[in-house]
């Protein structure tokens, strides 16, 4: 997981207006008609897909995967329908957020939908899960206090949440970070890793590949620097390392983790001024 800036300025006005009209219609409906209305308006949030993709450089907001064979969809961070709190407890969720850009995330299929981890046979995927740390406060249609809730799942648009997960530079697995201190933070990190499917085998394999490439670049660079001669390859390899650790790179979190493990690796890691512009 890596921080994603939700940027409404990337979205055409006409797309936003369609969502606003749908919201106004929803607000005017009696409660018994809301569920069917939302189901018939899926095209409204689907229209945001390409713009959410720009915000994350084409990557899943949860897993950092850019796999072209994955089905990407707009996920409602807070479920627009049923919200599963525990195995035995669910409720009507957050229908008033069905058309809210503040509730949209771009998610790859295996992070978004319930599926099986082939290696462990465990069920993963966010689905309709949205557990809370405490039963109160809990938002509902007549009391939209979602900003006061204490969600278990980490939000990729919040820097403090993203910092709770890191990648193990040795095995490529997602894990609680060094600042993930205390039972509550550890619960949030571990549950997010589980439900977002962040340790699926294909993700671990992809991270390991990126980490090997970064380490190879680093070792080649160190050998060149040891020669104490100014060679064009030095700049080229530095740029390759910066690109691998920029926010637009697939599995940048893993690349950074490996680089930071290496002596002087932090010096070569991408810096804020290296970040790409969103086209």
Image (tube, rainbow, N blue to C red):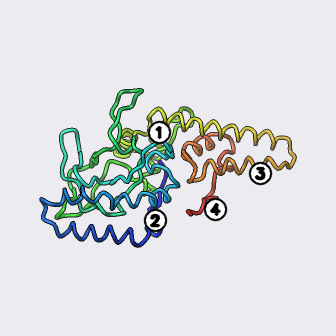
Q: Which of 232 and 185 is in front in this view?
A: 232
Question: Label 1 belongs to which residue?
Answer: 174
What is the spatial separation of the Cα atoms under label 4 and label 2, in whole angstroms? 19 Å
108 to the left or right of 85: right
Q: Which of marks 3 and 4 is nearer the N terminus?
A: 3
Q: Name the residue under label 2.
A: 7
Q: For the residues marked 3 and 4, what is the alpha-carbon distance in whole angstroms?
A: 17 Å
Mark closer to the chain start, 2 or 1: 2
Whole-angstrom CA distance, mark 4 to mark 1, is: 27 Å
Vertical order, 142 against 189 (above or below): below
- Residue holding disc 4: 273
Foreground of the two, 259 or 105: 105
Decide: marks 2, 1 in contact (CB < 8 A)?
Answer: no
In this view, the mark in front (4 or 2): 2
Residue labelled with disc 3: 235
Helix, strand or loop under label 3: helix
Rounded to the nearest angstrom, the CA distance separating label 3 from label 1 is: 31 Å
């Amino acid at each position: 997981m890596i921080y994603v800036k939700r940027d409404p300025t990337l979205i055409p006005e006409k797309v936003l207006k369609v969502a606003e009209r749908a919201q106004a219609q929803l607000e005017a409906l009696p409660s018994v008609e809301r569920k069917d209305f939302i189901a018939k308006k899926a095209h409204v949030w689907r229209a945001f897909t390409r713009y959410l993709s720009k915000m994350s450089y084409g990557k899943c907001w949860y897993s950092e995967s850019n796999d072209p064979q994955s089905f990407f969809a707009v996920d409602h961070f807070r479920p627009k329908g049923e919200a599963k709190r525990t195995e035995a407890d669910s409720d009507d969720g957050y229908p008033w957020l069905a058309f809210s850009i503040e509730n949209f995330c771009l998610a790859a299929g295996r992070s978004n939908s319930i599926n099986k981890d082939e290696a462990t046979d465990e069920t993963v995927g966010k689905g309709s899960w949205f557990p809370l740390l405490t039963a109160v406060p809990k938002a509902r249609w007549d009391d939209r206090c979602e900003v006061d809730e204490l969600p278990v799942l980490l939000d990729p648009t919040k820097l403090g949440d993203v910092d709770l997960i890191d990648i193990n530079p040795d095995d490529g697995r997602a894990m609680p970070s060094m600042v993930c201190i205390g039972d509550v933070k550890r619960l949030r990190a571990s549950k997010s890793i589980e439900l977002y499917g962040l340790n699926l085998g294909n993700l671990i394999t992809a991270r390991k590949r990126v980490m090997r490439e970064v380490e190879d670049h680093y070792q080649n660079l160190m050998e060149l620097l040891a020669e104490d001669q100014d060679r064009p390859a030095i700049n080229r390899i530095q740029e390759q390392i910066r690109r691998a650790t920029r926010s637009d790179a697939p599995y940048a979190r893993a690349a950074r983790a490996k680089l930071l493990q290496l002596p002087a690796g932090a010096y070569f890691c991408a810096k804020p001024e290296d970040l790409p512009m969103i086209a």
